[in-house]
Image (cartoon, grey):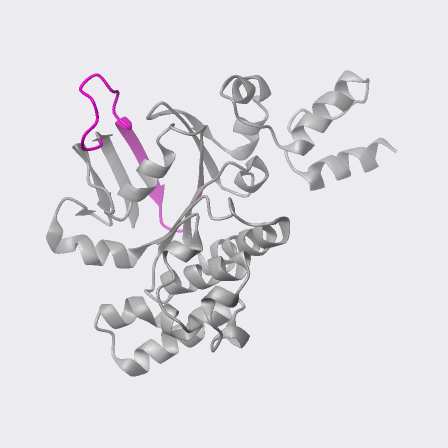
């Protein structure tokens, strides 16, 4: 199974005639089980692209295919949204029930899943995000990180094969960010869930298999995290931050330390420094 974006353009309704499109002939293929991070400054088109992947937005030109089904074909839209789950920046915007387990059950219920199967899915989804103990809690009493984990559980209860997460940690404290990213990494590595991860945090994007860099509605470049994040000059010119480990390694090399050129994580930096001794 694949998500295929083909020559996709998007013009927002009401935009001025001379305003460039939010997406301009974007082409991208995401395989089942792949972890793709999409980065770019505000206005680069990354969130607009994310909303196309399960049909929340429809192309002005081109198409988006999920397992061969076009988002432009209304006959397939609910099948597509079952395969591709969305998690947004603010979890309060997608938590709809007054009890956690009812919120997780909301999607399957609306999809006509039998009650016994809904119970199994809710139990399983809460277990997978480590929130079983909170099933009877009110969502508004949870922390931001816990709310995002419930939002992820709601997508898992739909048996989604991909999760599209649009800056899911932007409103969280460091502990919440760590919790959510840890869940996402585990779902990818242990369960083979495909991940499309939109983020401003480069330290989170290094967890991906592939990093896509966007600017002004187009894909500027893509590659492995090591290929992208060692291009510090390009990232700085785009207004993007560089992983702290990469920045520190650059400064240590400038100070005379013989460190490898491809350091992008704290672990790689620690190993390189230990080897110097």
Residue 161's x, y, as percent? 35, 57
| Magenta region includes residue 22 | yes
| Magenta region includes residue 2 | no
Furthest residue to the right?
277
Q: Is residue 71 above or below residue 246?
A: below
Q: Residue at x 56, y 35 (%)?
A: 202
Furthest residue to the bottom?
116
Q: Residue at x 26, y 37 (%)?
A: 5
| Residue 132 appears left or right of 33 | right
Q: Is residue 145 above or below residue 28?
A: below
Q: Is residue 170 above or below residue 109?
A: above
Residue 45's x, y, as percent? 35, 31
Residue 72's x, y, as percent? 14, 44
Viewport quadrant of the C terminus:
top right
Q: Is residue 194 visible?
A: yes
**26 or 41: which is nearer to us?**
41
| Residue 82 appears left or right of 181 | left
Q: Residue at x 51, y 47 (%)?
A: 171
| Residue 151 appears left or right of 69 | right
Residue 201 lies in quadrant: top right
Q: Is residue 263 visible?
A: no
Residue 17's x, y, as percent? 17, 19
Span shown in magenta: 12-36
Residue 206 lies in quadrant: top right
């Amino acid at each position: 199974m694949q998500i295929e974006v083909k020559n996709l353009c998007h013009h927002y309704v009401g935009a001025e005639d001379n305003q460039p499109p939010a997406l301009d002939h974007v082409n991208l293929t995401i395989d089942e089980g792949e972890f793709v991070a999409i980065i770019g400054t505000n206005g680069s088109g990354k969130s607009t692209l994310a909303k196309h992947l399960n049909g929340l937005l429809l192309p002005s030109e081109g198409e988006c295919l999920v397992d061969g089904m076009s988002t432009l074909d209304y006959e397939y839209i609910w099948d597509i949204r079952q395969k591709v789950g969305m998690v947004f920046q603010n979890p309060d915007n997608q938590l709809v029930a007054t009890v956690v387990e009812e919120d997780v059950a909301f999607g399957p219920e609306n999809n006509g899943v039998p009650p016994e199967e809904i119970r199994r899915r809710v139990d399983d989804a809460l277990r997978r995000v480590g929130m079983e103990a909170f099933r009877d809690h009110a969502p508004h009493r949870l922390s931001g990180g816990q709310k995002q984990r419930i939002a992820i559980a709601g997508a898992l209860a739909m048996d989604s094969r991909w999760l599209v997460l649009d800056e899911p940690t932007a409103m969280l404290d460091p502990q919440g960010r760590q919790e959510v990213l840890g869940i996402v990494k585990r779902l990818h590595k242990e369960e083979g869930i495909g991940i499309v991860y939109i983020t401003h945090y480069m330290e989170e994007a290094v967890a991906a298999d592939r990093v896509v860099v966007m600017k002004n509605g187009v894909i500027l470049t893509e590659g492995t995290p090591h290929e992208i994040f060692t291009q510090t000059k390009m990232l700085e010119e785009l207004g993007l931050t560089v992983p702290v480990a990469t920045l520190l390694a650059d400064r240590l090399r400038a100070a005379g330390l013989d460190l490898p050129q491809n350091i992008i994580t704290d672990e790689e930096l620690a190993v390189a420094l230990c080897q110097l001794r």
